[in-house]
Image: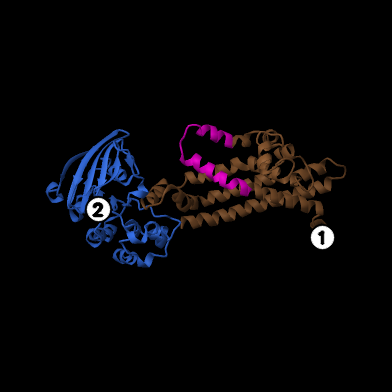
């Protein structure tokens, strides 16, 4: 029994890598996600539909297609990948940073949707009141809009983190399946299904994934409720 | 002194209002709901931009379509008490009161925190959240919050419309004291003759987006 409960080195590596990559995907995409959500919720401009569409694109595209587009854009010889490497030494191909980028892109629509909905729910009358009290638009955003949108921001963060944990198609297409670098839980599970007598290992990773997902959802419920009651006063 | 002369198309209402007030401490905008009172207040505050015209308060121009002047609300230095209070639900009463005050440089703070809290009788509420206040208490906090920005003009849009009569009597005496206590002129929108008679010394009668009459409330409401 104890043996069943203790994790193997491979499992620990895959779990650690999954959390690391999903964490960085979230941290990296959060500021941009909140900005995009605010722009979509509060601004009207030419090309808004286009922005809305491109934000949501990864939600409807097969992840493999997203991964292939990332490969074209951010690969070593890609349109963006080449200058990024030449000028800043940043390289996304076949490493964990690329896996984080793939996760961030695929999870981005979930983040933006949740944050946008909660920003749209913030009473614009309160924002107007803050303006008459002497606060400029940026201060209004950080002292009124964002604090009142916190429950939705948290929901978006958890959703996006959970989506990153489960990311497979874009990751394997963009950065391949490299042990210790890009082999996250879903990729480890896939690998085990491809080898003889990998069933037990695959089942264990399956259970670990379910457990992590349940923890994430329960955590978001508890946090969301606590934040919502705090904001309401 | 307020000089207001603007045109603004608002849905089916063509607002074309012009009035000037001098020497009056409390100017009331009187008219039925939908006459354009709130829109006029919002244009003075800078929350709605007129199509054309000019708005001046104490010889300071805040809007002039010909000169291309349109100060954003945060630079106009007018306090605004909304009909529905609009206290920030995530902040305590104390933080609500000081929200605008903190943005005024020390030298410009003519209204003291303690004085406002005492005058409005809200000291026991300071650590509460707005959700825990009665309607009358909310409006008193909203008045205090606007006052504490040391404004050049206090705008009040039906500040008592959402209160029942008992609550009104909790708020009206406070409003009546403001001009004397702080020397801040007030522009007060209302559709209640009683309110206007008890606090205003000049009245602007608004009908369908136009100014019909200007004069003393005692004469116009007689």
Front-most of residues B190 and B163: B190
The label number, if any, that marks residue B186 in the structure image? 2
Q: Residue furthest front?
A: A87
Q: Look at chain A in the picture and name its colour.
A: brown
Find the distance from the CA under tag 2 to the CA under tag 1. 76 Å
Which residue bears the numbered disc 1? A2
B154 vs A44: above or below: below
**x and y percentages locating residue B158 in the rendered image:** 28, 50
Do discs 2 and 1 belong to a common subunit? Answer: no
Q: Is residue A192 left or right of residue B203?
A: right
Numbered circle sitting on residue A202:
none
Residue located 78% across and 51% down the image: A11
What is the span of residues highlighted in magenta in the rendered image?
Answer: A26-55
Residue at x-position 35% and y-position 47%: B73
Which chain is drawn using blue? B
Residue A107: percent from left, percent from top:
63, 42
Determine the chain carrying the residue at label 2.
B
């Amino acid at each position: 029994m104890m043996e069943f409960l203790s994790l193997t080195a491979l499992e620990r590596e895959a779990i650690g890598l999954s959390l690391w990559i999903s964490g960085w995907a979230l941290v990296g995409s959060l500021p941009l996600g909140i900005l995009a959500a605010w722009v979509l919720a509060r601004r009207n401009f030419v090309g808004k539909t286009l922005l809305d569409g491109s934000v949501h694109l990864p939600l409807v595209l097969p992840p493999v297609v997203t991964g292939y587009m990332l490969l074209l854009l951010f690969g070593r010889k890609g349109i963006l990948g080449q200058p990024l490497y030449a000028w800043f030494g940043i390289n996304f191909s076949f490493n964990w940073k690329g896996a984080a980028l793939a996760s961030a892109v695929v999870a981005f629509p979930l983040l933006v949707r949740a944050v946008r909905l909660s920003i749209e729910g913030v009473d614009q009358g309160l924002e107007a009141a803050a303006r008459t009290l002497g606060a400029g638009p940026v201060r209004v955003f950080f002292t009124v809009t964002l604090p009142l949108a916190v429950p939705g921001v948290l929901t978006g963060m958890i959703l996006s983190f959970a989506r990153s944990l489960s990311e497979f198609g874009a990751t394997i297409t963009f950065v391949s399946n490299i042990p210790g670098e890009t082999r996250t839980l879903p990729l480890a599970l896939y690998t085990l299904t491809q080898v003889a007598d990998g069933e037990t290992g695959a089942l264990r990773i399956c259970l670990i994934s379910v457990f992590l997902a349940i923890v994430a959802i329960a955590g978001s419920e508890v946090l969301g409720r606590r934040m919502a009651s705090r904001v309401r006063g | 002194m307020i000089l207001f002369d603007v045109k603004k198309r608002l849905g089916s209402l063509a607002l074309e209002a012009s009035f000037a007030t001098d020497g009056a401490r409390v100017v009331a905008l009187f008219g039925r709901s939908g006459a354009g009172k709130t829109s006029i207040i919002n244009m003075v505050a800078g929350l709605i931009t007129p199509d054309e015209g000019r708005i001046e308060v104490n010889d300071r121009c805040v809007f002039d379509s010909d000169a291309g002047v349109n100060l954003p609300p945060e630079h106009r230095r007018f306090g605004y008490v909304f009909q529905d209070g609009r206290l920030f639900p995530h902040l305590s009463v104390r933080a609500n009161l000081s929200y605008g005050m903190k943005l005024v440089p020390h030298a410009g703070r003519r209204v003291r925190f303690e004085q406002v809290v005492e005058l409005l009788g809200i000291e026991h509420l300071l650590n509460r959240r707005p959700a825990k206040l009665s309607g009358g208490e909310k409006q008193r906090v909203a008045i205090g919050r606007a006052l504490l920005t040391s404004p050049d003009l206090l705008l009040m849009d039906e500040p008592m419309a959402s209160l029942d009569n008992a609550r009104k009597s909790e708020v009206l005496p406070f409003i009546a004291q403001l001009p004397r206590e702080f020397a801040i002129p007030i522009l007060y929108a209302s559709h209640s003759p009683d309110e206007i008679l008890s606090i205003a010394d000049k009245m602007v009668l608004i009908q369908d987006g136009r100014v019909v009459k200007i004069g003393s409330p005692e004469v116009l409401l007689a």
